[in-house]
Amino acid sequence: MKFKKVVLLYSGGLDTSVMLKWIQEKYSCELIALTLDIGQPQTDFEKTKAKALKLGAKKAFVIDAKKEFAEEYVSKAIKANAMYEDSYPLSTAIGRPLLAKWAVKIAEQEGADAIAHGSTGKGNDQVRIEATVSSLNPNLTSLAPVREWGLTREEEMAYAEKHGIPIPEKSVYSTDENMWGKSTECGVLEDPFHEPPKEVFSYTTLPEKAPAEAELIEIEFQAGIPCALNGVKMPLHELVMKLNGIAAKHGVGVSDHMEDRIVGLKSREVYECPAAECILKAHKDLEKTVCTIHENTFKTMVDDKWAYMAYAGLWLDPLMGGLNAFIDKANEKVCGKVKLKLFKGSAKVVGRSSPYALYDLNLSTYEKGSLFNQNAAPGFIELWGLQSKLANHISAKNGAHK
Ligand code: ARG
């Protein structure tokens, strides 16, 4: 295969740095590095850019996509109460289609013919990136050097050394991070019986070391999207990043998850998603408060499907548009405030209020003066239980229940 120009999704880490050099050598092509800021903490993007140029990239783009990520991706996940297999808020999963979208945009702008990424051949990320790239521009080829090059860790180090690529102090873990959360794999975590060691948690405080005092926070929602934190209005990306700091201090948002990958493997993942845990819990609670039982039970099924589609890398499948249309409709009235208590690893909803709440004190109260007509209950029960009663009586007549 021949390429004249390749856009590489560049993180600045060892793998993608080796790749940056390797692609230029292997294909004798020009290389353009692309790095997206989607709220991954502690990253010096200027350094990343300088490193790419030093390793021979013709151009290096750093795009601040924090606002776009929050408004177009995280917000949809919030409205869909997105939680894969009850444990994973899809932080990595929803970042990939945005990376792919930008890679296609830069490739088209620069006249490149291929896109390269650092994902392995065993994970979901290759699927998410390549399925999105081919949906957006079928003429672009996707390259996944890690999948093809077959370098061992030692060979990769030797290659890095030969080309003057700085080797970071050895980390045994593979991590991925953005404002919606951090995932950690590999090392001792590959033994699912082994408790995740302390050093895995770079982000959240261990519950046993978290403050002895609980902290109350208040999140306000407008049409399903958080718009204020503790009474202060702010854009979603700022709110998420601020809340990460607050909730991480209390050790909130950690999960240790046996995950079903789309490529058939099971893997053990450790997630730290402090803001996501608080926001998703608050959102779900408020949604339950304002929606009917029928909307709530139906939406659970739609939400499950949404989470699976996002996990499976099918962000651009037309079904997602249909699911989002329903989800947006249901979220129109998800407005109001939710109070949460953060304490030693847990975030609990302790209060909610909304102008759209279907909860009516005059109906629900056990105090005197309730408007609920209890005299209507016996008639309701008679009809509600009619078929069950009949079925049981007829079974008994035919010899069941003996
Ligand atoms: N298992 C997660 C997913 O498929 C995270 C994948 C990337 N994580 C990593 N540590 N490299 O979305």
Image: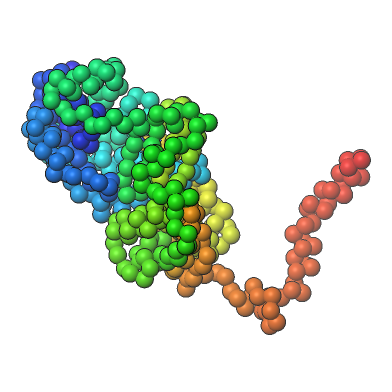
Q: Nearer the viewer, residue 213 or 9?
A: 213
Ligand 1 picture quarter: top left
Identified at 44% across, 69% down, the residue is 336
Quarter of the rendering occupied by the C terminus: top right
Could you tell me residue 30's position as x and y percent? 9, 27
- Horizontal arrangement in the rendering, residue 245 relative to residue 211 (left or right): left
Identified at 42% across, 40% down, the residue is 198
- Snapshot colouring: rainbow
Quarter of the rendering occupied by the N terminus: top left
Could you tell me residue 99's position as x and y percent? 26, 40
How many circles with numbers are drawn on the protein? Answer: 0
Q: Can residue 199 be spotted in the picture?
A: yes
On screen, 135 above or below 44? above
- Horizontal arrangement in the rendering, residue 65 relative to residue 279 (left or right): left
Identified at 24% across, 20% down, the residue is 156
Could you tell me residue 337's position as x and y percent? 44, 68
On screen, 21 above or below 239? above
- Horizontal arrangement in the rendering, residue 4 relative to residue 334 (left or right): left
Residue 57, quarter of the rendered image:
top left
Q: Nearer the viewer, residue 72 or 325?
A: 72
Q: Can residue 326 be spotted in the picture?
A: no
Could you tell me residue 398's position as x and y percent? 90, 41
